[in-house]
Image (cartoon, grey):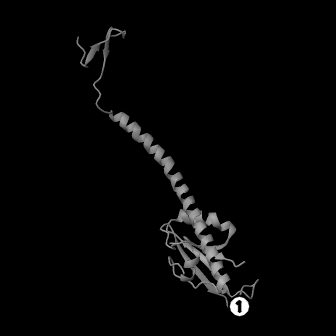
């Protein structure tokens, strides 16, 4: 009986059920089983890697935001040192004009992943501990990503006076 697969004679290879014959399949692609196995493995790897990627990305953005907070804080102190006044409040995403010269060139309060907002509040009676302090400054950070908001809060929250409302955290800049 002749084999249905293409066969060739190989004198060096012997098989118990077909002495002297080696069967070679004509392979031009992958079987459906091989494709399914690869898809399952890739799916498992993506399920493992994607949350970790998102977490690392949030850590990087929170680090960038911490740097922005310190840059704005230093610019505000520089402005105060020169003029004995604090910069005026600006809207969300708007760099206060008074800080432009003290911030890095091209500094923007609208960062894509988050938006900064310079705040200042007049305190007619001052603070209980410091009755002579008539102004309180802060930098608010807003984001639509609640996981990012939590990461930012964890990054800066333990070292700053802050309060949080939803996905907006306001970091108070305490004059030293």
Instruction: Left or right? Give the position of 16 relative to 141.
Output: left
| In front of the other: 88 or 49 | 88
Mark 1, residue position: 125
Q: Is residue 51 above or below residue 88?
A: above
**At which x and y percent is residue 116?**
54, 74
Q: How many marks overall? A: 1
Residue 70 appearing in the image: yes
Q: Is residue 155 above or below residue 84?
A: above
Q: Residue at x 55, y 55 (%)?
A: 56
Q: Residue at x 65, y 76 (%)?
A: 172
Picture quarter with the N terminus: top left
**At which x and y percent is residue 134?**
69, 88
**At which x and y percent is residue 88?**
58, 85
Q: Residue at x 36, y 34 (%)?
A: 33
| In front of the other: 84 or 69 | 84
Picture quarter with the C terminus: bottom right
**Residue with the most extreme right position:** 129
Where disc 1 sits, the SS reads loop
**At which x and y percent is residue 147?**
54, 62
Q: Residue at x 50, y 48 (%)?
A: 49
Within-10-Å neighbours for mark 1: few <14, some 14–19, many 20+: few
Residue 171 appearing in the image: no
Q: Is residue 22 above or below residue 139?
A: above
Q: Is residue 105 above or below residue 30?
A: below
């Amino acid at each position: 009986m002749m084999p249905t697969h293409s066969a060739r004679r190989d004198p060096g290879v012997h098989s118990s059920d077909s002495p002297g014959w080696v069967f070679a399949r004509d392979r031009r692609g992958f079987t459906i089983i091989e494709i399914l196995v690869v898809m399952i493995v890739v799916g498992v790897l993506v399920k493992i890697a994607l949350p970790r990627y998102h977490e690392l990305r949030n850590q990087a953005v929170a680090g960038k935001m911490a740097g922005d907070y310190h840059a704005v804080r230093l610019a505000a102190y520089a402005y105060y040192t020169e003029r004995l006044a604090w910069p005026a409040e600006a809207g969300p995403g708007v760099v206060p004009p008074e800080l432009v010269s003290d911030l890095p060139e091209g500094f923007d309060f609208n960062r894509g992943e988050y938006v900064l907002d310079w705040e200042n509040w007049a305190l007619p009676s001052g603070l209980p501990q410091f009755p002579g302090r008539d102004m309180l400054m802060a930098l608010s950070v807003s984001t639509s990503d609640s996981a990012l908001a939590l990461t930012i809060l964890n990054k800066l929250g333990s070292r700053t006076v802050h309060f949080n409302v939803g996905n907006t955290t306001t970091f108070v800049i305490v004059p030293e």
